[in-house]
Image (cartoon, rainbow, N blue to C red):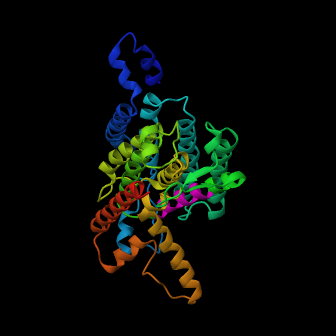
Amino acid sequence: MLYHLLYPLQDLFSPLRLFGYITFRAAYVAVLAIVFAIVFGPIVIRLLTRKRVGQTIRDEVPERHKKKAGTPSMGGVLIILSILIPVLLLADLSNQNILILVLGAVWLGALGLYDDYVKIYKQRPRGLNKQTKLLWQGLYGLVVGLVLYLLPVEPEIATRTNFIFLKNIIIDFGFLYPVFVAIVIVGASNAVNFSDGLDGLAIGLVGVTAAGFAVLAYISGHAGLSKYLNVIFVSNGGEVAIFLAGMLGAGLGFLWFNAYPAQIFMGDVGSLALGGLIGTTAVLIKQEFLLALVGGVFVVEAVSVVLQIVYFKATKGKRLFLMAPLHHHFELVGWAEPKITVRFWILQIIFVLLALSTLKIR
């Protein structure tokens, strides 16, 4: 809103030209998101406590988690608002990518909110059944894919994407592109959800991932840099960096209260939405394959769950890990919760740096 109000007045007041720079707006979106989350965090915590919106703990988790029962949950609402308000103020709301991301925040946030409602108020610790969640996640992914396929800003690259490592290799999915988009978004949404099990873990990983993708979004939307680094130029892709800056800022602000020992949890309203939004940004800037590296720890966590299930069924009851997702395995090994969290953050930073290095490898 401020962007649309102030930037047109640049001829009357030249400093307003700053609003034309993506880097300027991204920085202030991040700052506003941090401030919003920190200022309104205590209010949200008090409100959730008063409404008895407490975390439910499943029986199979490590024993030390039982003491977390009753900690305010659904904090993802604070994260989503901390992203959307600065973005709506400073982003270009005529940009198709921004509109898609706002839709994703609302759609997946609503799905996660209802899932948390079922867990807390209907006393069903596992929430909605998997099929229902996958259905609504998949529908959002298909909607995004169909919009990009049927209403492309740049028809010549609508169904194409970059491939990692190899120079000038472009993959074109054709009419299957909407299905590919749905798979990417659903996978990312659930991968982040699997990682949300320790104080500060998931939101820290999201922040690191958002920072990495913000760099990639800026490069993708910059004609000179994208050409130099051999990636598909997405003319409206730079604006995605502003949304990602909001995710980074909101994540840091939420971490203020979610760091060990957590005063609030994000719940599925946060994890499902943030994961889906990360997947969506990868789609919008044509870096779907690089998502596996940028979100490396999320991938490892998700794979650990799949391997545990497959191994359990193949061996008729034996376990590959002491518990899955992987962070619970290290808990049972004896690692302290903060140590696991910080080490996983470090690994995620390494993954992001490796992902960025692939741009030059190409």
Name the outermost residue toward the right. Answer: 175
Residue 99 figure quarter: top right
Q: Position of residue 86 (x, y in %)?
A: 42, 33
- In depth, the one of 298 and 296 nearer the eye is 296
187 in the magenta segment: yes
Residue 187 figure quarter: bottom right
144 in the magenta segment: no
* Residue that appears at 44% across and 77% down: 323
* Residue that appears at 54% across and 32% down: 95
Is residue 234 left or right of 19 when viewed as pictured?
right
* Residue that appears at 44% across and 57% down: 362
Q: Position of residue 7 (x, y in %)?
A: 43, 20
Q: Position of residue 212 (x, y in %)?
A: 39, 51
* Residue that appears at 58% across and 87% down: 314
Residue range (magenta)? 183-194
Residue 222 in view in this figure:
no
Is residue 55 left or right of 102 when viewed as pictured?
left
Residue 244 in view in this figure:
yes
Query: Vertically, is 126 above or below 106?
Result: below
Q: Position of residue 262 (x, y in %)?
A: 33, 56
Magenta span: helix, strand or loop, mainly?
Answer: helix
